[in-house]
Image (cartoon, rainbow, N blue to C red):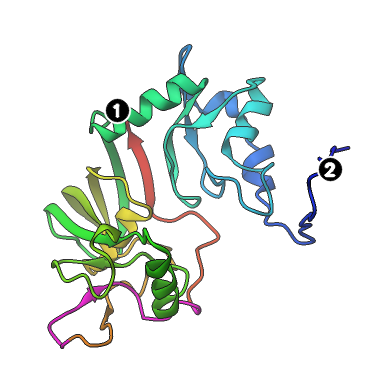
């Protein structure tokens, strides 16, 4: 039984919450421990389990699932992996450790390596885009009107497209190598910045979307915003994304080193 404060005037009940039961409860978390000390627990996160609680389900996400299984009362993700991504994830055992890891991230003291499976070969070397991360209410409203929820928007030049300058954030990664594997390419990547969906969006913008990433499989289609000319392209999926859905299974991306 949950006690409600007398100040609560509304309670939202989800009759069909999003469920992540299988990757939460049907996993032996003790076998997925990669490292543990007094401050941090590093695990091999399975695909299909979110790092951040869904609005309709705060019970089945990474920290509560691992904590219940291992008897740890305080666990917080020190960084995030997308729900469909698997691999190395750092969980902080206390608030001080979480803040310390956040400082390391901000100072670029944390190096993150990924392996990806793509449908095409990406360009080798440094990839640099700007991602739209709306910082103002007007920018959020305009982005939703133009594109709806879904894939992240990228640009390669300095045209703000009517958004405030602070809403464009740099995205950087390094493609070290790729190897042909029949219909796919095995790609080794170092992530420099850490934007949401960054690897997925940048590779899709280079015509090399990840295997099984339904949200970005149309990423090679450039989008024209209103009042732009034919040479002024935003690299992103089609302008309205209501027909695109997040994949419900693992995609071709794994965090292999941190």
Residue 10 occupies quadrant: bottom right
Tell me if mark 2 has few (under 14), some (14-19) or many (20+) residues whose alpha carbon lies within 10 angstroms of its own: few
Q: Position of residue 148 (x, y in %)?
A: 46, 74
| Residue span colored magenta | 229-243
Q: Which residue lies under the disc numbered 2?
A: 6
Relative placement, left or right, of 22 versus 13 is left
Image quarter (top left, top right, bottom left or bottom right) of the N terminus: top right
SS at circle 1: helix
Tell me if mark 1 has few (under 14), some (14-19) or many (20+) residues whose alpha carbon lies within 10 angstroms of its own: few
Comes first in the chain, label 1 or label 2: 2
Residue 208 occupies quadrant: bottom left
SS at circle 2: loop
Find out whether the residues at labels 1 and 2 contact each other: C-beta distance under 8 Å. no
Closer to the camera in the image, 177 or 173:
173
The answer, for residue 251, to whether it is visible in the render is yes
Relative placement, left or right, of 254 versus 17 is left
Closer to the camera in the image, 120 or 81:
81
Point 67% across, 20% down: residue: 71
For the image, the number of numbered tags is 2
Point 57% across, 38% down: residue: 62
Type of secondary structure dominating the magenta stretch: loop
Q: Which residue lies under the disc numbered 1?
A: 104
Point 61% across, 30% down: residue: 66
Closer to the camera in the image, 104 or 119:
104
Q: Position of residue 23 (x, y in %)?
A: 62, 43
The answer, for residue 182, to whether it is visible in the render is no
Residue 122 occupies quadrant: bottom left
Residue farthest toward the front in the current orientation of the protein: 7
Q: Reply yes or no: does residue 148 show up in magenta.
A: no
Point 38% across, 44% down: residue: 254
């Amino acid at each position: 039984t949950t006690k409600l404060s007398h100040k609560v005037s509304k309670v939202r009940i989800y009759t069909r919450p999003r469920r992540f039961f299988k990757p939460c409860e049907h996993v032996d978390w003790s076998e997925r421990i990669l490292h543990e000390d007094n401050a941090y627990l590093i695990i091999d996160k399975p695909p299909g389990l979110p790092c951040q609680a869904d609005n309709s389900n705060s019970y089945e996400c990474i920290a509560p699932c691992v904590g219940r299984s291992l008897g740890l009362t305080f666990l917080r993700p020190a960084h995030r992996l997308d729900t469909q991504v698997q691999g190395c994830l750092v969980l902080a055992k206390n608030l001080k450790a979480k803040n310390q890891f956040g400082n390391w991230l901000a100072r670029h003291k944390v190096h993150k390596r990924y392996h990806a499976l793509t449908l095409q070969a990406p360009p080798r070397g440094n990839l640099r885009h700007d991602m739209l991360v709306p910082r103002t209410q007007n920018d959020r409203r305009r982005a939703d009107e133009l594109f709806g929820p879904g894939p992240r928007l990228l640009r390669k030049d300095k045209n703000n497209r009517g958004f405030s300058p602070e809403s464009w954030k740099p995205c950087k990664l390094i493609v070290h190598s790729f190897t042909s594997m029949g219909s796919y390419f095995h790609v080794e990547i170092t992530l420099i910045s850490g934007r949401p969906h960054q690897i997925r969006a940048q590779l899709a913008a280079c015509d090399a979307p990840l295997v099984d990433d339904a949200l970005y499989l149309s990423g090679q289609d450039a989008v024209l915003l209103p009042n732009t000319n034919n040479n002024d392209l935003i690299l992103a999926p089609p302008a309205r994304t209501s027909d695109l859905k997040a994949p419900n299974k693992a995609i071709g991306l794994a965090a292999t080193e941190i």
